[in-house]
Amino acid sequence: MRTSYDGYRLLLVHAHPDDETINNGATMSLYAARGAGVTLVTCTRGEEGEVLVPGLSHLASGVDDGLGSHREIELAKAMKALGITDYRFLGAPDHIFRDSGMMGTDPNNRPDVFWQADLDSAASLLVKIIHEVKPHVLVTYDEIGGYGHPDHIQAHRVAMRAVELADQWKVQKVYWNTMPKSVLAEGIAKMKELGSDFFGAESVDDLPFAKDDKFVTTLIDGGAYVNNKMDAMKAHETQIAMDGPFFALSNNLGLQIWGDEYYTLVQGTKAEPFNDQGRETDLFAGVIL
């Protein structure tokens, strides 16, 4: 991996504040520290999220409906921890899509939620950002949004459609976030030994976001930036509990469980350098400036 990425540009498309840190925090911090342009686009403010801090329960959508504004503050703190200065909400400042909630719930039927947005209209907003930023690499979710959340699925659709529609700039490589079963299986086994669990999963097959290892084309070793990621996770206090499964894994398996971040290359060509498993070790491998 290069020591300098001056001139290289990365765009990440996520559904809610905190998704970026969980999936890509170490990657984002690594590339930003080495000079790459890193832009985060978040598609909603996460108004329908669960509030894990008892003292902030009044922010919930069913009470004061103030969670979205609070999560904007959390996102700003997380980006400071990761060293990211270019982060924005899709459609801002004119219009920000509302969190859609889970499939089949009342919020999912609101006309202002992201899930109900016209695909090409939403994609055109992202196209403007692509034309402005000119990213060489784009990162988003797979076709089921990792675990089936409507906003994650819609973020995937919007990102992939925007890449198609961006006629003034060709994104050279597109990656989907992934988490290999082998890593999660190790984590579940360790948690069981300690009398705990990971999201209540008995086995890795209970986790919808767990993917067969064969889908992993690329592994970014962000171990040197994992503390930045952990600080960013702490910033998302309403969504990531300090005594919850994410930090429990860190305590029991070591921080590197979050320093390694995995990807599936879906557009573009794999390129050296490769690790001993034949996986890329650089998102920008093969990119032409």
Image (tube, rainbow, N blue to C red):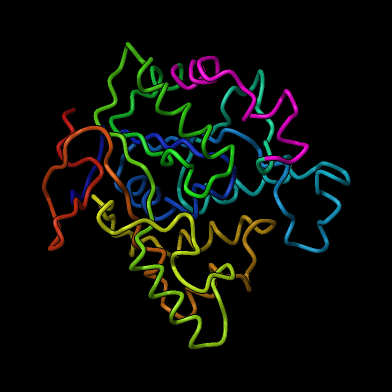
Q: Is residue 161 left or right of residue 234?
A: left
**In the depicted view, which residue is nearer to us: 160 or 202?**
202
Residue 48 picture location, percent across and down: 72, 44
Which residue corresponds to the image point at 42% horizontal and 22% vertical from the top-left?
Answer: 161
Q: Is residue 250 magenta?
A: no
Residue 181 picture location, percent across and down: 36, 64
Residue 97 picture location, percent across and down: 65, 28
Q: Is residue 90 left or right of residue 55?
A: left
State the image quarter where residue 168 is shown. top left
Which residue corresponds to the image point at 27% horizontal and 55% vertical from the top-left?
Answer: 219
Q: Is residue 89 left or right of residue 65?
A: left
Which residue corresponds to the image point at 11% horizontal and 47% vertical from the top-left?
Answer: 272
Which quarter of the figure is the C terminus placed in? top left
Give above or below for 131 relative to 279. above
The residue segment tinted magenta is 104-127
- The overriding secondary structure of the stretch rendered in magenta is helix
